[in-house]
Amino acid sequence: MVYIKKSRSQRVLKLCGILLLIIICAVGSFLLLKSFRADKVNITNNTAVNTNEMQTKGVGIIRAAAEVEPGEIADATKFELISVPENLVPQDAVGSIEELRDKRIKNKLYIKQFVLKSDLIPSSAWYGDEDRLIEHTFLPGTIPSSATSGSIIDIKLFRQGAMDAVVISKVVIVNKQENTLSLYLNSREQEYLKEAATEGLLFITQYLDASQTPSDLTYTPSYD
């Protein structure tokens, strides 16, 4: 009888031990899962905060406060500095009024349009005191399709059996309407352009950048 009671006591203790072990494992699993969920929420929240900070971080950028025509001096009164989210800033955006110093606007700008570095050229690259605005119509196919207002070009003369002559070197297109170009030319350039047009085919070549060296003038009018 004593043996039976002892066996029962051992079984009860063993069963209690198993139950206690199950409870401990269950509590541990619950705490581990709760901790994992908390970490996941923190990571998500931190990611959201960092993304929001990136989107709202302000970067200074210059935009037009009024319409600006090609060739105008970049007058600071026509521009304003604003702050925009970093992810919305164009790659070559102008970031300060100081960058407009001694520059002209190459392309027409509209109100609230961002100013790009490609919109600027040196103030000396546009026209001089003796220059006057003229228009000249070229034959179809003689103007590069990429040439537009603000493009820098040479005007050349094609004559059968002769080298192409540079009539006008490094001039800026003020405006383009189909095959008609508006240009600032001095009196000598105007005469050369009129004379060359009677001697052969005039055509345009375009500079890639305002910093390129001007072509040498190689045209000599027949009356010279």
Image (cartoon, rainbow, N blue to C red):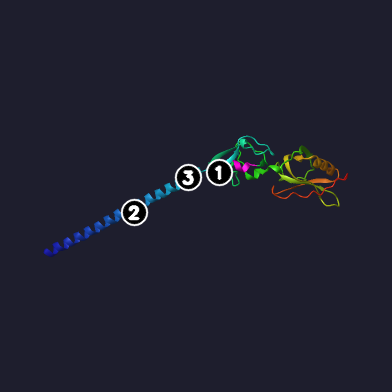
- Foreground: 166 or 16? 166
Q: Identify the image quadrant of the N terminus.
A: bottom left
Q: Is residue 79 above or below residue 15?
A: above
Q: Looking at the picture, how far across and down is residue 215, in whole percent? A: 76, 50
Report x, y in % for residue 76. 62, 37
Q: Where are the magenta residues, as a range? A: 97-101
Instruction: Tell us which disc is closer to us: 2 or 3.
Output: 3
Pointer 3 local density, CA inside 10 Å: few below 14, some 14–19, many at least 20: few
Q: Earlier in the sequence, mark 2 or mark 3?
A: 2
Which secondary structure dominates the residues rendered in magenta? helix
Q: Amino acid at mark 3?
A: Glu
Q: Amino acid at mark 2?
A: Leu
Camera-side residue of 9 and 114: 114
Residue 40 image label: none
Residue on which the image places disc 1: 88
Residue 117 can be seen, yes or no: yes
- Residue drawn at (40%, 50%), measured in percent from left and top? 40
Q: Residue at x 23, y 59 (%)?
A: 17
**Marks 3/1: CA distance?**
14 Å
User: What percent of the width, then of the height, locates residue 14?
Assistant: 21, 61
Task: Give residue 196's quadrant in the image.
Answer: top right
Instruction: Please tell me which of labels 3 and 1 falls first in the chain.
Output: 3
